[in-house]
Amino acid sequence: EVQLVESGGGLVKPGGSLRLSCAASGFTFSNAWMSWVRQAPGKGLEWVGRIKSKTDGGTTDYAAPVKGRFTISRDDSKNTLYLQMNSLKTEDTAVYYCTTVVPLLRYFDLWGRGTLVTVSS
Amino acid sequence: SYVLTQPPSVSVAPGKTARITCGGNNIGSKSVHWYQQKPGQAPVLVIYYDSDRPSGIPERFSGSNSGNTATLTISRVEAGDEADYYCQVWDSSSDPFYVFGTGTKVTVL
């Protein structure tokens, strides 16, 4: 079965760190471009960042609100995507979704169920 | 950054047609994609590349894109279509690159 399963969410204090994981199965993860999209409570969808496949350079890009604080990485041997979040702010509170990205047309094909990150003192 | 504007809400009776607009500067020159999100669930892709449907998405869902407006049309609306709908484009000159619309809540009366 093709699926993405996020984990690692939880409650963290402002200024703290958290690492999210996304386990992929049912497709060739190493060939996939991957992304994180978040959704604050009661709000719309917001793109966080993307990592290309290693064959396409493995480069990352981030949205301005998280640039310099968040880092996306991948371990193709484990079929796992990561989101390292540092210097967390209350406005980072959201459900974080892991997604696949279709490279040519740049849309989000497969979504995980999401993991909730709450930043609060 | 590139901005996509959607109406906050659209109401439609069962069996009728719902049209959800997505406005953006010269959006007709970009590829537009649409997602459906039901309460408590992850988004699901319903239209990609303006008007193509992924496998498993009913033919009742269709899309168009021209000028400054893209439109998602849901024909013969069913109660199960009640959800939030988001448009999305990619713009290499924007920050962020991947832009979502503001979202539209579709209510089936």
Image (spheres, coloured by chain):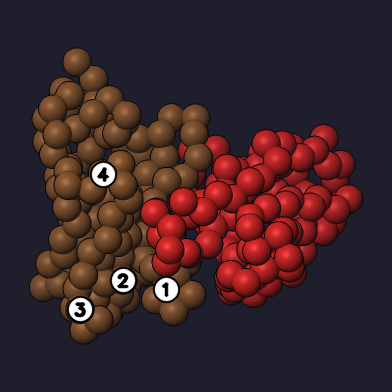
Secondary structure at numbered mark 2:
strand
- Give the chain ID for the brown colour: A
Label 2 is placed on what type of residue? Trp
Task: Identify the mark nearer the N-term, 3 or 1.
Answer: 3
* Residue underneath mark 3: A57
Residue A115 seen in this snapshot: no
Label 1 is placed on what type of residue? Val
Measure how far apart labels 4 and 3 are at the Cα level: 22 Å
Secondary structure at numbered mark 1:
strand
Residue A67 seen in this snapshot: yes
Contact? badges 2 and 4 (CB < 8 Å): no
Measure how far apart labels 2 and 4 are at the Cα level: 19 Å
Q: Label 4: few (<14), some or many (≥20) within 10 Å?
A: some
Q: Is label 4 or label 1 in front? A: 4
Which chain does the residue under circle 3 lie in? A
Residue lying farthest to the top in this orientation: A121
